[in-house]
Image (cartoon, rainbow, N blue to C red):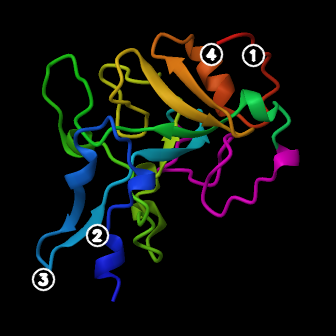
Amino acid sequence: SQLKPRETHLNVFLCPSDPYSQSRYVVRDTSSTPPEQYAAGSYAANWGPSSATVNLDDTPVTSEGVFYRNSRTKFRDITDGLSNTLALGERTNGPIRTSTGVSHGHSSFETAWCCSAREISDPPDDHGHMVLFETQFRPNEIDSDDKGVSAPHVGIGQFAMCDGSVRAISENIDKSVYNGLGTRSGGEVIGEF
């Protein structure tokens, strides 16, 4: 009964500049009939900065960003300012750029998919990183991972801010500024970016 909805591409969730979007699926299980697969999307929500010990896979509710498992974040909680806080980021459905030219794992089909919370009984396997992004890596950063953003545009990534505006952010943005944009109440002073 959920087969048709989970395999339906919605144009509103796809970047028209991404040549991979229209035909991309995330295949989760090929042993079932039909295979368990999900239609791709081009946008992920801001989980915030990460570290080796705090990240969206291992500590999904310990987020400084706006979105996380069971998030109840309200505008009043975003004390860094709605125009200084990332809401959504663009993510290509093609491979992530690597220094070796070879992608692997999730990196070979970097995608956001709206049905990621798959294993309710196994939270570590909920694949939240497929609908959320961390600000650990700058947009389009070479050798990043599947938890970052990667746009099909040269030199920039497109982002929706919490105030509803859309910004093109350079892939050369200062890392501390980018991490600051990822927090909802970190107190960072963000200048022009």
- Residue on which disc 2 sits: 7
**Alpha-carbon span between mark 3 and mark 4:** 47 Å
Question: Which region is colored magenta?
Answer: 53-77
Going by the numbered disc 4, the residue's amino acid type is: Ser
Please indicate whether residue 182 sits to the left or right of residue 145 in the image: right
Image point 74% across, 27% down: which residue? 84
Q: Which residue is mark 4?
A: 176
* Nearest to viewer (mark 3 / mark 2): 2
Circle 3: residue type: Thr
Task: Indicate which disc, 1 or 2, sits on the residue closer to the N terminus.
Answer: 2
| 67 vs 169: above or below | below
The residue carrying pointer 3 sits among few (fewer than 14), some (14 to 19) or many (20 or more) residues within 10 Å by Cα, namely: few
**Which mark is nearer the camera, 1 or 4?**
1
Residue 170 placement (x, y as % from top left)? 49, 15
- Of circles 1 and 2, the one toward us is 2
Query: Label for residue 190?
Result: 1
Residues marked 1 and 3 touching at CB (< 8 Å): no
Q: Nearer the viewer, residue 49 or 192?
A: 192
Distance CA(mark 1)–CA(mark 4): 9 Å
Cα gap from disc 4 to disc 2, whole angstroms? 38 Å
Q: Earlier in the sequence, mark 1 or mark 4?
A: 4
Kind of residue at badge 1: Ile
- Image quadrant for the N terminus? bottom left
Mark with earlier residue (3, 2):
2
Location of mark 3 (residue): 33
Of 52 and 193, the residue lying toward us: 193
Give the residue type at disc 2. Glu
Helix, strand or loop under label 2: loop
The rendered magenta stretch, by its main secondary structure, is classed as loop
Relative image position of residue 165 (x, y in whole percent): 67, 34
Q: Is residue 8 magenta?
A: no
